Image (cartoon, helix red, strand yellow):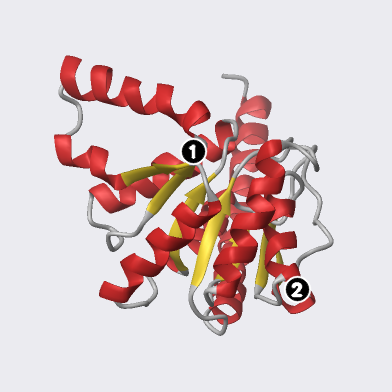
Amino acid sequence: MNETLRVSKQRKWTESEAHSSWQIFKIMAEFVDGFETLNKIGPCISIFGSARTKPGSRYYELAVQTAHRLSEEGFGIITGGGPGIMEAANKGAQMAGGRSVGLNIELPFEQKSNPYIDSDKSMHFDYFFVRKVMFTKYAQAFVMFPGGFGTMDEMFEVATLIQTHKIERTPMVLVGKDYWSGLLAWIRTSMLEAENNIKAEDLDLFVLFDTVEEVASYMVSYYAKNPLKPNF
């Protein structure tokens, strides 16, 4: 290798290492800010779903109503802080006078803070993995509305954490039988029956509902028998 080229590559590598070292402090700061803010909020439910769902649509309005009802039961609502289902859930929480938390992420498209987040509970993250910790550590349940890759990522990450006992057994509610039934059928027939990649009891991680009252009743019944506490 040409000596000048070798020195140039070595310099770039060294500069990259230095950047990575400083990056650790930025990551630590995001964790500290998140823990200090969310530790004060109390029992919450994380609601996931598409950023592309429009106001007035079926699932947008259902998310508003669901968050409103859960807030009436005393749960704070945590979302990704953006538009779509996230906006709907924050809106429902705020309408009910509940705690409305937004964990926003810096993205080149789609994501901007919605106007229904409490001013002292709006957070911004650069790192998806830090944000996911906040979603999971302080949530007493997870409600998944129809969404895309991001929603699927969040859903399966939570399922994996529960399956591997990295977090406590926590309610995972899928809202919208029309949307989720095909995926659950594939999990059963392909993951379980055809390939034996999961256990039969893993299917019990999910419950599937269509209405606000089903979701609310399930949460109230579950926590009448189980303690409310952070997941880890």
Which mark is on residue 88? none
Nearer to the camera, 106 or 68: 68
- Provide residue 168's location: percent of width, then percent of height: 28, 63
Element at badge 1? helix
* 53 to the left or right of 223: right
Q: Quadrant for residue 222, please give it.
A: bottom left
Task: Determine the residue positioned at 75% across, 73% down.
Answer: 118
Nearer to the camera, 116 or 154: 116
Nearer to the camera, 86 or 75: 75
Dot 1 alpha-carbon crowd within 10 angstroms: few under 14, some 14 to 19, many 20 or more: few
Q: Is residue 105 visible?
A: no
**CA–CA distance in space, label 2 to label 1:** 26 Å
Element at badge 2? loop
Which mark is on residue 118? 2
Task: Determine the residue positioned at 61% across, 71% down.
Answer: 29
- Provide residue 186's location: percent of width, then percent of height: 33, 20
According to the picture, the residue beneath numbered tag 1 turns out to be: 153
- Provide residue 74's location: percent of width, then percent of height: 54, 77
What amino acid type is highlighted by mark number 1? Asp
* In this view, 32 is above or below 166: below
Nearer to the camera, 55 or 51: 55
Q: Is residue 219 visible?
A: yes
* 146 to the left or right of 232: right
For the C terminus, the quadrant is bottom left
Nearest-to-viewer mark from 2 and 1: 2
